[in-house]
Image (spheres, coloured by chain):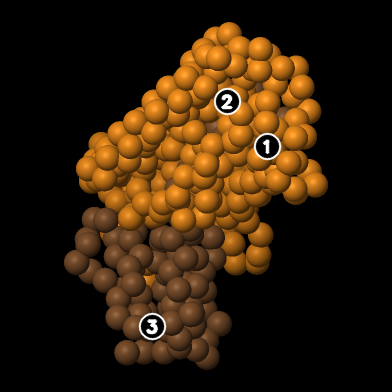
Chain colours: A brown, B orange
Amino acid sequence: VKKRLVKLVVNFLFYFRTDEAEPIGALLLEHCRITKEEENVFSISFVEEPERKYCFECDSEEQCQEWIEALKRASYEFLRRSLIFYRNEIQKMTGKDPLEQYGISEEARFQLGTRKQ
Amino acid sequence: MKLNERSLAFYATCDSPADNAGFLYKRGERHTAYHRRWFVLKGNMLFYFEERESREPVGVIVLEGCNVELCDSAEEFAFAIRFSGTKSRTYVLAAESQAAMESWVKSLSRASFDYMRLVVRELEKQLEEVRWGPTGGCGGCQESPGSWKTKPSGPQQSPEQLLALPAVLPKENGCAVWNNVPGEDRPPNTSGCSRYDGEGNPRPPPLPPRRRASSSEAGSATGATAESPSTFCQLHERYGREVARLRQDWLERQRGPRP
C-alpha cells in the first residue's frame, strides 16, 4: 500500500508521489467501473480487463463516497450522455433545440442514437 | 509517466461511434516530412493509427487546453493543434480537401472536456428554468404543459423521466449507451413536473383541471371541465397505459443488454 496524491482532472485520474510535482501515472477514466470495496476502499476496473482492479483506500467512508461519486461522473462519455439528455428534455418541453443558439446542433458528437463513423 | 495504455487503446478501437475519423497528414516531430495516418477523434482524445486497419493506435493527442488554428504551410489544407507552455509542441496536420480541413478544425476545437462541461452546465441551468421557472419555485407542478390538455394530436404522453440526471447510473461510467439514452426511444413527453420524488416513488398525478386553485391555463381548464363526464375515464385510461409502459421499460432495463 503506497500513499499517493491523487488528482482528478477532466477524465484522467493522475497520481503523484506525495512530494513530487510531476505525476508518476494517470488513468484514463473511460469505460471503467467504480466499485465500493470494503470499508473506506473503492476500486477502478476497466471493461477490457475487469479482473484488474486499481484499489484506493481513503481516510474515511465519507471521502470514499465522495470519490466514488466524482469518478462515476468523470468520463467524457458520461458528460456526453448528460448533454444529450438535457438537450432532449429541453427540446421536448420547449419545442426548441437549445444547441441552435450555439450553432452546434449538427455536430456529430451531440447526436442521439447512431452516428456516422 | 505511466498510462493505462490498454484502456486507451480500447477506447480508441471499441465500437463506440467516433466524433470524426479520416486520413490526415501529420508532420513529424524532428523532420518536417508528413506521414499519412488514420485519425480517430473520440471525446477529447485524438488517436492516430499507422493504417486504418491497425488494431492499436500509435499515438494519442489529449485535446485539453489547446488551440486549433489554420496555419501557413507549404502543405495545402494545413492546420495546427497548439498547446501553450514552453515544453509543449504544436501538432501540424493537413487534410486532403478544404471540406475535410474545415470539418476537422470544427470538431477538434469543440472536443475538449472543458467545453463539453460548459455546455452541459448551461443546458442544466436552462432545463431547471424551463421546469421550475426562473424564480425557482414549484409553480410548474400545478400545470404540466401539454400532458394535461386534450391535445388534438392525441399521442400518448409518457411521464417525466427520472428527475436527477441520470439518476440511475449505469454500471460502467463510460459505456457507450447512446442507443439506450433515456428519452431517445420513448414517446415524446411534455410533462413539466417530475412524476417521481427523490426515491423514485411515483408522485400522485396532478389534480384535475377544474380543482386547481391557481391555474393560469383557464382556457384549457374550462375545456377539460366541459368534457368532464369522459375526462376521468380518459385520465384513468391514460395513467393506466403510462404505468404499464413504465413497468415494461423497467423490466426491459432489468434484463437489459449489457456488454
Task: Tell me the amino acid under the disc marked 3.
Answer: Asn
* Whole-percent x, y for residue A82 in the image: 52, 45
Residue A84 is at least partly visible in this image? no
Q: Which residue is mark 1?
A: B142
**Nearer to the camera, A113 or B21:** A113
* Whole-percent x, y for residue A80 in the image: 50, 44
Pointer 2: residues within 10 angstroms few (<14), some, or many (20+)?
many
* Whole-percent x, y for residue A87 in the image: 58, 35
The chain to which mark 2 is attached is: B
Classify the position of the N terminus of chain B by image quarter: bottom left
**Nearer to the camera, B217 or B31:** B217
Q: Are marks 3 and 1 in contact (CB under 8 Å)?
A: no
Asked whether, in this view, residue B23 is left or right of residue B259, the answer is right
The chain to which mark 3 is attached is: A
The image quadrant that residue B75 belongs to is: top right
Q: Which residue is mark 3?
A: A40
Asked whether, in this view, residue B56 is left or right of residue A91, the answer is left
Task: Tell me the amino acid under the disc marked 1.
Answer: Gln
**Nearer to the camera, B114 or B134:** B134
Task: Tell me the CA gap for discs 2 and 1.
Answer: 12 Å
